[in-house]
Image (tube, rainbow, N blue to C red):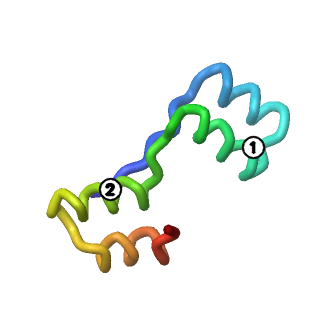
Amino acid sequence: GIFEFLEGGPDLETTILKEASEVALREVAKRQEMVTMQEDGILKVLSGVTTFDEVTDATGEIEW
């Protein structure tokens, strides 16, 4: 499996209460240095666990 985890906490809560836009939530994720599902999938391709085709099927076209 490939995973993505956005940690809850005061920063996320404040963002949701102020402006729950996708852009604002992405900024919170960036500050947390969150690894996206696609990034996790690519890491697993590089370690031989899966393939690029499987990652693309699960997450859409790979964004380089």
Which of the two residues, 28 or 21, is positioned nearer the viewer here? 28
Residue at the right extreme, as displayed: 18
Indicate the secondary structure of the residue bearing disc 2: loop
Give, as a three-letter code, the residue at label 2.
Ile
Which residue is found at the position 43% from the left and 48% from the top? 4
Q: Residues within 10 Å of mark 2 (few under 14, many from 20)?
A: some
Q: Disc 1 versus disc 2: distance between alpha carbons?
A: 24 Å
Residue at the left extreme, as displayed: 48
Question: Within the image, what quadrant is residue 42 found in?
Answer: bottom left
Residue 7 versus residue 61 in the image, above or below: above
Residue 50 versus residue 43 in the image, above or below: below
Residue at the front extreme, as displayed: 64
Which numbered circle lies on residue 24? 1
Which numbered circle lies on residue 50? none
Q: Looking at the picture, how far across and down is residue 21, in whole percent?
A: 78, 49
* Count of marks placed on residues: 2
Q: Which residue is mark 2?
A: 2
Which residue is found at the position 24% from the left and 73% from the top? 51
Which of the two residues, 47 or 19, is positioned nearer the viewer here? 47
Q: Residues within 10 Å of mark 1 (few under 14, many from 20)?
A: some
Indicate the secondary structure of the residue bearing disc 1: helix
Q: Quadrant of the N terminus?
A: bottom left
Horizontal placement of 53 versus 19: left or right? left
Which of the two residues, 64 or 61, is positioned nearer the viewer here? 64
Give, as a three-letter code, the residue at label 1.
Ala
Which residue is found at the position 65% from the left and 36% from the top? 28
Q: Looking at the picture, how far across and down is residue 22, in whole percent?
A: 72, 52
Which residue is found at the position 60% from the left and 33% from the top? 31
Q: Looking at the picture, how far across and down is residue 48, in whole percent?
A: 15, 63
Horizontal placement of 8 versus 41: left or right? right
Q: Looking at the picture, how far across and down is residue 32, in whole percent?
A: 54, 32
